[in-house]
Amino acid sequence: MRIPTIKWAVPHCYALIFFIIVVVAVLTWCIPSGSFDYHAVTLPGGETKNLVVPGSYHVLEKVTADGDLRQGLSAILAAPLEGIIKAADVIAFVLIVGGAFGIIMRTGAIERGLLALAQRLAGKGILVIPLSMTLFSLGGATFGMSEEVIPLYAIFISLMFALGYDSLTAILILFLGTQIGYVGAMTNPFSVLIAQGVAGIQGNPQLWLRAIAWVVFTAMSIIFTMWYAHRVKRDPSKSPSYESDSQNRSLFMGEQTGTVHFSLSDRLIIIAFVLALAVISWGLITRGWYMVEIGTVFLALGLFAGIVSRMSVSDVAESFVDGCKEFVYAAVVIGLARGILVVADNGKIIDTLLYGLSEMLDGLPQYAFTTLMLVSHNIITFFVPSSSGEAALTMPVLAPLGDLVNINKEAMVMAYQFGNGLTNLISPTGGVLLAGLSIARVGFGQWLRVIMRLFPLLWITSAIFAAISAWV
């Protein structure tokens, strides 16, 4: 008798997130609710953060006259909407950028530019990977580049298709590139500098070690991405996204072949696009720009593209709407993922988990401390994916534990930045990852099939660097 095989598939991204919301809601019934006291502190950069008061944890009653902390059916159903409201700034940014790209892509200038670039890089397209990933990783390591690359997904996916690679190669270049910069961060103001400020570290005493770690992590990521790209180019069927790419290729690439001819408007649009990226880079580095400023630049770029290509006002508006439609899926994913954190926060279980981890780590021997600290941050990041949020929440509690076992505070910061950065590579609560996957029409399971080949090596390497940081 033949035993039927069961084909298991990762559920739709929305279904996966909703399932996690349900699980977290159940945990609010099982895990005691509790809270630390917080106080406002102005960090060296001038930013004000609410920091935990060490030793202030106290258990909260689940049911009081003010309400019930146990998250039930109504809380589960409300979580997606609350998450979307709390993530409104990011969602608005994604939609505005998507609309602007709708106008730009309607002109066909970018598509023709990518085809021309692919023709010029014939046989040398693999060089795009190390050059791009080095720049993106450096951006993540120095000034915290992350959401800023969301507008580039459509461009890089089109370029990878033109060069014979798949959509996952584009995600590796953009997301792994910037995220590995967070893992090996040197002066990232959203992770390292905040954590050092909260922990009371003056200057950046282990910058030299962070620089070495950044080089190692970036090199590992580039080598892996080049290996993967070469593998799928040689045999496209080995790509986890082979079927979805076959269906969606036409969304990113036209059917043009042969020699590409540019019009004057094409050249102006491409020049404007390059200038816009340069202006954004300048603003990020020198002016602290974020989503409003970046979105404004892309909107201006979209309108400029529509004008020079002589599109009518109605065509520009329709193209903007079409562009928004393409990014709605990604925008909603970001809001739904925030809903997970809403349920955990409303149930007051995040501080309880943090307190439990701090108690578990207290009194451990030095050789085990840094590794378990890394694991602790891996776990915490699932509930608090924000690098700055996790630093403000955990450093006041966990940093003093290092003094008890004679481990310097820089090792505590290292464990935090490694744990946060690595978990965000594989966590479904990370909005940037899900946004990139959504734009590429790639499933979360398909991403895991690729990144989990590299993740264990990255984790082991991070554990080694955390241990070195404790001993130097």
Image (spheres, rainbow, N blue to C red):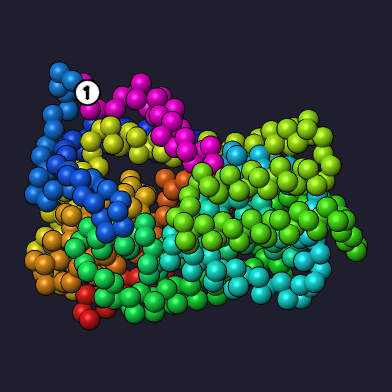
Nearer-the-camera pick, 160 or 97: 97
Nearer-the-camera pick, 86 or 13: 86
Residue at 29 percent of width and 76 percent of height:
206
Disc 1 marks which amino acid? Asp
- Residue at numbered disc 1: 68
> Is residue 320 in the magenta section?
no
User: Helix, strand or loop at disc 1?
Assistant: strand
> Is residue 79 in the magenta section?
yes
* Residue 273: quarter of image: bottom right
Residue at 12 percent of width and 51 percent of height:
54
Q: Is residue 49 above or below residue 313?
A: below
Nearer-the-camera pick, 302 or 460: 302
Which of the image's four quarters has the C terminus?
A: bottom left
Say left or right for 258 vs 340: right
Residue 78: x and y, percent? 40, 25
Residue 126: x and y, percent? 67, 73
Magenta: main secondary structure equals: helix
Residue 73: x and y, percent? 35, 22
Q: Is residue 451 visible?
A: no
Please provide the residue range marked out in magenta: 67-93
Residue at 13 percent of width and 61 percent of height:
400
Residue at 13 percent of width and 62 percent of height:
401
Residue 291: x and y, percent? 50, 46
Within 10 Å of disc 1 (Cα), the crowding (few <14, some 14-19, many 20+) is few
